[in-house]
Image (cartoon, coloured by chain):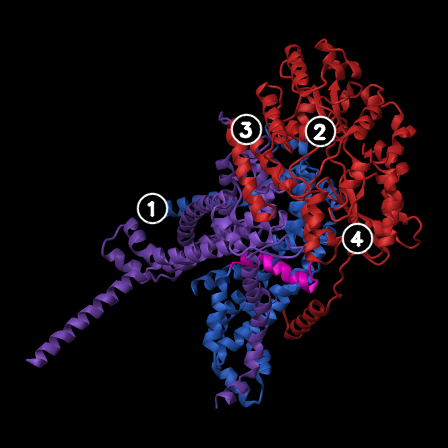
Chain colours: A blue, B purple, C red
Amino acid sequence: MSVERIRTITGHVVLMLGVAVSLFPFYWMVVMASNTTPDIFAYPPKLVIGSHLFENMGKVLDNVDFFGSMLLTLVAALSVTVLVLFFDSLAAFAFAKYEFPGRNVLFGLLLATFMIPAQLSLVPQFVTLAQFGWIGSLKALIIPGAANAFGIFWMRQYAKGAIPDELISAAKVDGAGFFRQYLTVGLPVLRPGLAFLGIFTFINVWNDYLWPLIVMTDPNRLTLQVALDQLNGIYGTDYSMVMAGALMSVIPLIGVFLIGARSFIADLAAGAMKF
Amino acid sequence: MAVNRIRQALPQYAAISPFFILFAIFGAFPVLFSIWISFHSWDGIGPMQWVGLEQYHYLVTDPKFWQTIGNTMIIWVLSTVPMLLLALVIANALHNATRFRTFYRIAYFVPNVTSVVAVTLVFGSIFSNNFGLLNAFLQSIGLGKVEWLTQPWGIKIAIATIVTWRWVGYNAIIFLAGLQAISADVYEAAKVDGASSRQTFWRITVPMLRPVILFTAVTSTIGGLQIFTESRVLFGDTSNIGGPGDAGMTIVSYLYQSAFIKNQFGYGAAIGWALFVLIVLFSIINWRLIGGNDDERVTSRARRRAERRIKQQKETADVR
Amino acid sequence: MPLSRRTFLAAGTGAAVAGLTGCGSRSSLGSASELTMWTWVGSVNDDLIGQAEKGIPGYDGLKLSMTRIGSNYKTKVLTALAGKSLVPDIVAINDDVATYFPNADQFHDLSELGAKERENDFLAWKWKLGVTPQGKMMAYPMDTGPTALFYRSDLFEKAGVDIDPAAVAQQAPDWDSYIALGKKIQQAIPGAAITDNVNSVFAYRMAQQPQRYMTADGRYLGDQDHVREAFDLAIRVVREGLSANAQDGSTDADAVVTNGRLVAFNAAVWWAQLGPKNAAPKTKGNWRVAAAPGGAGNRGGSFLAITKYCKNPEAAFAFISWLESAQNQAEAFLDPVLFPSTPASYTDPRLTAPDEFFGGQRIVDVFAESAKKYPGAYFSPYDSIIGDQLSAQLVIVETGGKSPDQAWNDAQEQIERELTRAGAI
């Protein structure tokens, strides 16, 4: 065997070990969700998938309004995603392809907002939304996140390279206004970029915990993450049920991710390289 | 003229306005407002009571606050160092692998898209003192149990493990993109010069990865300083969200506890500002350490000095 | 990604419109035909709530909608009040009712809704706890928490102690004799404990005192002798080896009841349910209660308040005064052992029936005696701040062996800092 070949095999062994560590918690989640709590607490613990999965899932549905929370989370995540895609791509298109007074200053300002940690405004933002009467309602989850600096920055980088200036000039000659140019020239070209930003935004809203924990004050209207935490807080001793809940909350999102995973990962890496 | 140009650009201003309007209402205004709040004693419900700098005075003399900074730093180091090293190893192996690449990438990336709440519940069961998988394993190989979730170090290791597990794959993917951007010619040239593979790694790969390493270092610093969910979910149903002895209480946990459990909105706002200062500070430190501008700065300074000297010599020569 | 321009735009506009116009902001939680109420698990009788969920007596078309909050109850109530919208009509409040007094304007004055007429039905000291220093009736009494000595008759017998409640009360009239009794039992039953942890002794000793941490006019008392005495007593019980070192909220807390380590416990009435009945159903028949060493006391017992966001305050008051009538409080004594704040209930057959869990003893006699004798004490809005610091230090003394003087000084220092910041001193 050549040195080259040994190297390749060692590489794969290392990578496979890493994959095992990376995926084991998911396997363990399924093991716990499909066994009874006494089985998990036994020594030595059961390490194989059991037969109580549906029983445990049923208990979750009895104890929390799982589908209600899921629907609420879905509405919030979809609304934010659609708004972000629209507002961010529109702004990015303008920043990338047009000269206008103050453009660079405004873009610099936008970049500067990156430095502000969300937690700095946790308290005042809560107070502001309380004045609007939005606490406890979906608006508190959707509106403040409807456009963001990261998305605009990322889309601008993408748009700069992807949209040929000639196409815009041609549209201008045809008498198309700015918004028309955005629709006919910008959007079609930006579509792959939108797919990335969409998945990215959706995942972030779906998984967010701190903000919904604070603003969703009605115990009957919680997002999935907060409901899951609640399930653990009240029935924490029933491990297998809590794990069934965790599993149910994770599956839809991993599904969404796997659909676009290939290009998503590539786009994410490419985005990081542009910083 | 200028007015005309502005009028012409109205559609563009309209296009970028949603972000700036939302930011003004939900970003800029709250930030300014939080300065105002931090000068008050306020429970969020009743009237605000002006206390001047009292909250900040309390903050700098508050042992709990300093403890949470210490906790956050320790958790950050315990997670970031192994995370970036492992990511570098994995990225290197991925770079050399030609088969199963897509599978590997997805498998490494899945932890990152999984919700922290769910992940923490799973790891909570792995680290559990009495029924945990890890302790069962330690017992089976003849070692004793470790009280992971009650001992100060156990708590920090558990939290750091969760962070590391979620972010190794993410950083590996980014390092990989960095590696792929290094042109093959450079390596070719190094080979011709007879460089060993270790020399190649430290002399070529790492320096050329600097911008990427900077990116991951900055993002993991900002992320690390904002850790909250892990400790909240691990210890959330007890009245103390930082765990026994507050060993898992992070800065953000303390902010949350102060503002939303103890209803001290003024103090919560002050902690928010402390967090902001820390993030700016650490970003600058990162930039300085890994930024790599030093060489350029040194060279440009040297160049300027050389130019000045040449100029001087010329002038003296002219005078003569 | 199958994302056509047309659907994208339509969805974008739709979401934006829905988000921005949405339903108008409501300040009260629930629909117009509902009275919403938040409480924690185990604070009400489920049958009575079930009746009100079908319809509020006397108010046709109005129903109760109740939410039992599993964890972090107070945080959720305060956050909802700070959020100013979707606030429930009625909230339950624990014995820290005074911490809500600075925000009394968030609640209706119950005397304006007819509470005055009911005052004589209730224990005077309990009634007073719900009234602010300015005289506003902010919270309506639910149950009380009179204290007594719970003990295991089977284990006392084994140790050669007379198990008759009157005899036990006579042998341990104060804490000194109680500790001596504990030592005696320990000789027959190694490891026997008379408290689950250090803080129970501290809390139940404080629960017997006529004053707590502050005076009504705002003077700090937390460094006075009566507090130090309770502090030192708690540590003394630990040093005598009579504490089971099972900290609150740990799994051990139940275990010491189940495994019989806890042979006696000076506790409030509601502990009967939370302790032995839940954790050690097999000990049925072996428990008794006697008058507590150190005198009558009260710990816990809750209140109901009507928020200013309430849709129909008259109906809400009609509901809470119905729920807390002497009749219905007697029902809540059966399940989940909530002790009535209405003396008329004490002679109700549902209370005076012998309790088989306590070997057929009429436990109401012991607790009613305690409830009537209890002197009452002033609870200040800052009691939680003060009490939390003292408790935290006591835990360190018990689990970490910190010196009591150091712990006391550290607690006082921290309390002074916190009270200064809160503007209390």
What is the crowding at mark 4: few (fewer than 14 residues within 10 Å), some, or many (at least 20)?
many
Which SS class for mark 1? Answer: loop
Q: Which corner quadrant of the image does residue B181 belong to?
A: bottom left
Q: What residue is pinned by disc 4?
A: C108
What residue occupies the far left of the structure in this picture?
A: B320
Q: Chain of mark 4?
A: C
Span shown in magenta: A117-136
Q: Amino acid at mark 4?
A: His
Please tell me the numbered disc located at residue C208.
Answer: 2
Q: Which residue is mark 1?
A: A2
Q: Is residue B116 above or below residue C9?
A: above
Mark 4–mark 3 CB contact (< 8 Å): no
Q: Say which chain tag 1 marks.
A: A
Chain for numbered disc 2: C
Q: Secondary structure at mark 3?
A: helix
Q: Main secondary structure of the magenta part?
A: helix
Of B276 and C250, the residue lying toward us: B276
Gap between marks 3 and 1, in whole Å?
66 Å
In the image, residue A91 lies at what x, y percent? Answer: 55, 74
* C-alpha span from label 4 to label 3: 43 Å
Q: Position of residue B36 (x, y in %)?
A: 56, 61
